[in-house]
Amino acid sequence: MFYFTDFYGKKVLKSTLIDELEHFFTTRDFMLTCGELTEKSAQANENRKFLCEKLSIPFNSIKTANQIHSYNVSVVTENENVYENCDALVSTIEDSTLLMNFADCTPIILFDSTNNVASIVHAGWRGTAEKIAQEAVEIMKSKFNSKPEDIKAAIGPAIGECCFAVDENVHNQLVKHNLSGLETTYRYDSQTNKYYIDLKNLNKIQLLDKGVLEIDVCGYCTSCMSDIFFSYRKENGKTARHSAVVKLGKRRY
């Protein structure tokens, strides 16, 4: 279950499913990346300093990515902080802090407490079409011995089926690699000739197909709730970003 809570006076969103992992999804109240709103870059920088102070980590030590709407996954290392050309990060480094940015695309946090492995996935429609969440699970399995049944997934706030209208070309790209259960992930509107896609549910089905059994899906639509979250579509491409943040703790045993 998702719930709003307070991070030292800043409104954030968390999932009870992964409460053992230090994590949250930010809101407009806690902008960490200014996106197209370059006039807010100083505010975003101050918020990042605040984040680092409260998480007790050095400034500029956050692990993040230059996201490109791909299905590329990078494994975090001690010495590298910014990862090029990828849309998912996987870490098993104790006390590492991961951050990725969103403004309608689907944020997914994956956590395997048995092996102390965490991942943040940025699943836009292109990444979803190429099954980036499944790719992150594969990396967790192959490099860190995670079993899918030990992985918990929190699918955070993203644009909902209610607002994500696409043309036949985008629909067909999603269909091409996603046949199982697809009928539950979209509806067709004959009046507008548009397909309304449920990206969160599609990512959930992909994770289930990969053997991930415990999945929490946030019901909030970023476009409908653009007073709380940033929405690229609702704000016509001129908006900041909300973020998914994870700080991996020490392995318990």
Image: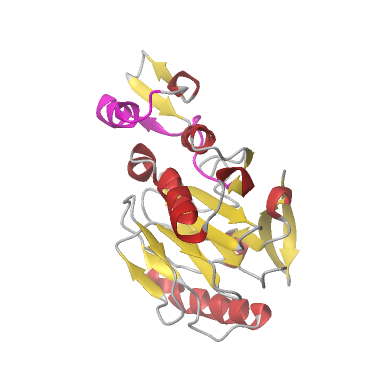
Residue lying at 50% horizontally and 53% vertically, measured from the top left: 230
What's the residue at 59%, 47% (across, down)?
153
> Is residue 18 toward the left or the right of residue 208 in the image?
right
Q: Quadrant of the N terminus?
A: top right
In the foreground, 63 or 165 = 63
Q: Which color scheme is applied?
A: secondary structure
- Residues 4 and 154: in front is 154
Q: Is residue 23 visible?
A: yes
Instruction: Tell me, yes or no, if residue 240 can be seen here.
Output: no
Q: List x then y, in percent, for residue 16.
A: 74, 50
Q: Quadrant of the C terminus?
A: bottom right
Residue at left 32%, top 42%?
Answer: 126
Q: Is residue 36 left or right of residue 156?
A: left
Q: How many numbered tags mark residues here?
A: 0
Tell me which corner region of the image, top left, top right, bottom left or bottom right, holds residue 29. Answer: bottom right
Closer to the camera in the image, 104 or 224? 104
Residue 179 sits above or below residue 77 on the image: above
In this view, 21 is above or below 225? below
Q: Residue furthest top?
A: 190
Residue 207 on the magenta segment: no
- Residue at 39%, 66% in the rendered image: 65
Which quarter of the picture shows residue 246?
Answer: bottom right
Image spot of residue 109 (x, y percent): 56, 53
Magenta stretch contains residue 171: yes
The x and y percentages for residue 138 are: 44, 49
Q: Answer above or below: position of 98 versus 211.
A: below
Magenta stretch: give its range.
155-179
Task: Give the farthest residue toward the left.
Answer: 169
